[in-house]
Amino acid sequence: MRSFRWGILGTGKIARRFMQAAFYVPEAQVIAVGSRAQSTADAFGAQFGIPKRYGSYEALLADPEVEIVYVATPHSLHAENALAALQAGKHVLCEKPFTLNALQAEQVIRVARALGKFVMEGMWTRCFPLIREVVRRVQAGELGEVRLVIADFGFRPPFDPNSRLFAPSLGGGALLDVGVYPVSLAFLILGAPAQIVSYAALGATGVDELCSIIFTYPNGAQAILSASLQVETPKQAHLCGTHARIDIPAPWWKPSEAWLTRSDGTREHLLYPYEGDGLQFEIRHVHECIHQGLTESPWMPLDETLAIMRVLDTLRAQWGVRYPGE
Ligand SMILES: NC(=O)c1ccc[n+]([C@@H]2O[C@H](COP(=O)([O-])OP(=O)(O)OC[C@H]3O[C@@H](n4cnc5c(N)ncnc54)[C@H](OP(=O)(O)O)[C@@H]3O)[C@@H](O)[C@H]2O)c1
């Protein structure tokens, strides 16, 4: 495959992990990094051998050599950054959650479609070979009818009211940071829920720190999901069907193995080991999509991203969590 020229917006934790993953994708050329400060861009660029280092996001977007922009900024900036990148003629991989809310997601998707540019929510879980295999098994009917999905993602970061995890102005809260993973898994396996029941404990900054969610579906299936910034949860996923169950051990959102247990007691070990952190699968997928002339990912379609954002909005409305400007 030909090479693809990437530019990165933001120099935080996930931007660093992206650089480490790009190491496993020879056709990924990260040619530029953009930061709010020149010194940060210079340090990041020097550490990872990125030749072009810009002291503003606008300057990176004005670089005609950048083909694909990776938006690695806090949630509250995703829409603004993705729109600017699209309008500058770039393809976009935008970190999860796609935007702060569905209204913003609609806007980004509308602009991307009008301009014929590729855009994808960085729900990297969907790109792992093990998840592709799990989807294949589910679609082949090996589990029978999946009636119950159980998944959680919770951890306990140090409390910092100004950090992006807790600050309302940066889209803080467990749901948007980690809850989006189990919600997206439920969508992947069961589709959009018919009814949503939930509870969230809000913390000192007014954002959700512990969430419990139940989705129900027209066929009677259910999903039981949780997310947390207060406690470490088991970080497992279980897909329970009428003929068999798939158990994905921790950390299920970047899995290398799972167990398929059939009603007759037989078990199969699904094993898909990988090197590094696994973000390389998403990078490769973006390349393949663009190579094929696609403007959206078949694994993370834009209509589904939008439906997920609407569900996140519904959940926050149930809890009374609103961000500044909403
Ligand atoms: N896929 C995954 O596994 C994964 C993991 C973690 C995070 N994420 C997503 O990636 C995004 C970034 O998360 P992160 O953990 O990398 O965050 P982070 O470490 O706080 O980095 C965010 C970066 O955004 C830039 N930024 C621009 N405006 C900012 C502001 N007002 N406050 C703070 N930073 C600002 C900063 O870069 P400059 O100073 O260089 O401009 C900063 O380094 C989030 O949306 C998160 O959900 C995804």
Image: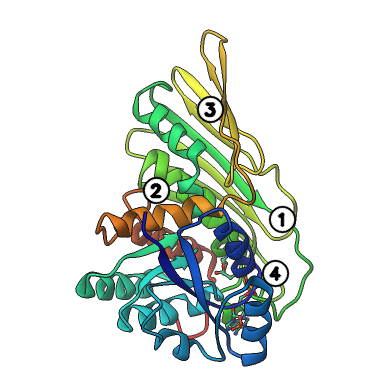
Q: Nearer the viewer, mark 4 or mark 1?
A: 1
Q: CA distance from mark 4 to mark 1?
A: 15 Å
Query: Label 1: which residue?
Result: 155
The residue lying at 31 percent from left, 60 percent from top is 290
Considering only order in the chain, which callout, 3 or 1, is on the residue closer to the N terminus? 1
Return the mark for residue 195: 2
User: From what the image shows, is residue 246 above or below residue 154?
Assistant: above
The residue lying at 62 percent from left, 73 percent from top is 49
Q: CA distance from mark 2 to mark 4?
A: 26 Å
Q: Nearer the viewer, mark 2 or mark 1?
A: 1
Considering only order in the chain, which callout, 4 or 3, is on the residue closer to the N terminus? 4
Where, quadrant-wise, is the C terminus in this rendering?
bottom left
Q: Quadrant of residue 142?
A: top left
Q: CA distance from mark 1 to mark 3?
A: 23 Å
- Label 4 amino acid? Gly
Query: Label 4: which residue?
Result: 203
Circle 2 packing at 10 Å, graded few (<14), some (14-19), many (20+), is few
Q: Nearer the viewer, mark 3 or mark 4?
A: 3
Q: Quadrant of residue 210?
A: bottom right
Say if residue 179 shows up in the picture: yes
Q: CA distance from mark 2 to mark 3?
A: 24 Å
